[in-house]
Image (spheres, helix red, strand yellow):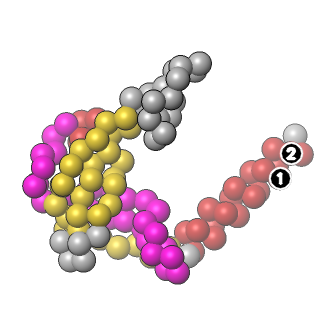
């Protein structure tokens, strides 16, 4: 029980620090590709290092203002609807000090 409380507190503290150190941005982007990563079942050999216990639909976009490439996790319906060279609006969080994109979504 005590380990769980300590672990939860550490995770909460890390999330608070990471959100404080992030800046929210948005802008226009162009879809440059799409990728699908299948889920891995327990005991199954991992063929793709990105594989997890759930399916992933990834949309690769290039920001129009600065050319930055971002991978956005989408739901299946949104992933199927998007086509290459299509314009989309993106909202993302970027680290103030590192410039790392932490979270992105298609609006």
* Residue 63 position (above or below residue 103): below
Per the rendering, the mark at residue 92 is: none
For label 2, the SS is: helix
Q: Is residue 70 magenta?
A: no
Q: CA distance from mark 1 to mark 2?
A: 5 Å
**What residue appears at the point 50 percent right and 34 percent down from the top-left corner?**
52
Q: Is residue 76 left or right of residue 100?
A: left
The image quarter containing residue 38 is top left
Residue 75 visible in the displayed image: no
Q: Quadrant of the N terminus?
A: top right
- SS category of the residue bearing label 1: helix
Task: State the residue in front, 37 or 81.
Answer: 37
Residue displayed at 16% across by 40% down:
81
Q: Which residues are magenta?
A: 80-107
Q: Quadrant of residue 26?
A: bottom left
Mark seen at residue 6 = 1
| Vertical placement of residue 70 versus 2, above or below | below
What residue do we see at 57% from left, 74% from top? 20
Packing grade of label 1 (10 A; few <14, some 14-19, many >=20) is few
Q: Nearer the viewer, residue 98 or 14?
A: 98
Residue topped by disc 2? 3
Mark 1 near mark 2, Cβ–Cβ under 8 Å? Answer: yes
């Amino acid at each position: 029980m005590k380990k769980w409380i300590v672990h939860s507190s550490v995770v909460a503290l890390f999330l608070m620090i990471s959100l404080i150190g992030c800046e929210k941005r948005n802008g226009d982007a162009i879809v440059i590709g799409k990728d699908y990563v299948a889920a891995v079942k327990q005991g199954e050999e991992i063929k793709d290092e990105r594989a997890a216990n759930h399916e992933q639909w990834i949309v690769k976009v290039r920001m129009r203002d600065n050319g930055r490439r971002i991978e956005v996790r989408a739901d299946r319906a949104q992933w199927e609807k998007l086509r290459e060279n299509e314009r989309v609006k993106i909202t993302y969080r970027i680290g103030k000090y590192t410039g790392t994109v932490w979270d992105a979504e298609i609006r």
